[in-house]
Amino acid sequence: MSMNMYDKLHKASKEAETVVKGNKVPGMHFNPLEHDEVQRVSMKALNDNRLYPICTYKNTLNDNSIFIECTMKIYDIDEPSNTIEIVGCSALGKLDKFGTGNAMSYARKYAFLNALNLNTGLDNDDGIKAKPFKKSEPQKPKLTIVNVDKSFAD
């Protein structure tokens, strides 16, 4: 029995290695999650399961930045009409000679992370432990009455 697209993607997700974070660079307080490492881990898991991703990009320019949205379509090599789309991974880049490429790489990296639910860990190697957000109670609106005309109170 052949595996369907979802079985293959599930298997790829389970088989994918943990993405190793890069080394800290001056000015960063965390170890970066590098595009090349995410792509290496992702492509191995996808290729081993006969899946192949193709990205398309939509860009929007404004005065000082470029917004890139990546749509990753993953094809089943054995049944190319079967696809899964990862939509909505986006990034913002500067309007310079590197901005478009940087934003495309960033958006693609997050499409891979979303497609395979890659393990990257929450804790950094710098001793700072990630903590979940605290659940806050809904705030009750406060009613403040200012400058009440007492003639209406009678």
Image (tube, rainbow, N blue to C red):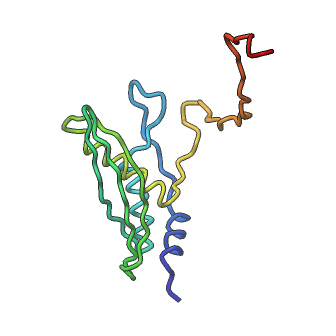
Return the x and y of residue 23 as percentages of the image width and height: 42, 36
Name the image quarter holding residue 124.
Answer: top right
Camera-side residue: 26 or 80?
Answer: 80
Left or right? Give the position of 11 relative to 95: right
The quadrant the C terminus occupies is: top right
Could you tell me which residue is drawn at 26 percent across and 37 percent down?
62
Q: Is residue 130 left or right of residue 109?
A: right
Q: Is residue 144 left or right of residue 16?
A: right
Percent position (x, y) of residue 137?
Answer: 74, 34
Q: Is residue 99 above or below residue 75?
A: above
Residue at the (48%, 50%) spot, across then down: 19
For this rendering, which residue is in front, 135 or 74?
A: 135
Give the vertical position of 139 relative to 74 (above or below): above
Q: Based on the displayed image, in which of its 4 quarters is residue 143 positioned?
A: top right
Question: x%, y% of residue 122?
Answer: 58, 42
Q: Residue at x 38, y 56 (%)?
A: 40
> From what the image shows, is residue 4 above or below residue 113?
below
Seen as rendered, the residue at the extreme left is 97
Check the image and name the residue furthest to the right: 154
105 with respect to 130 (left or right): left
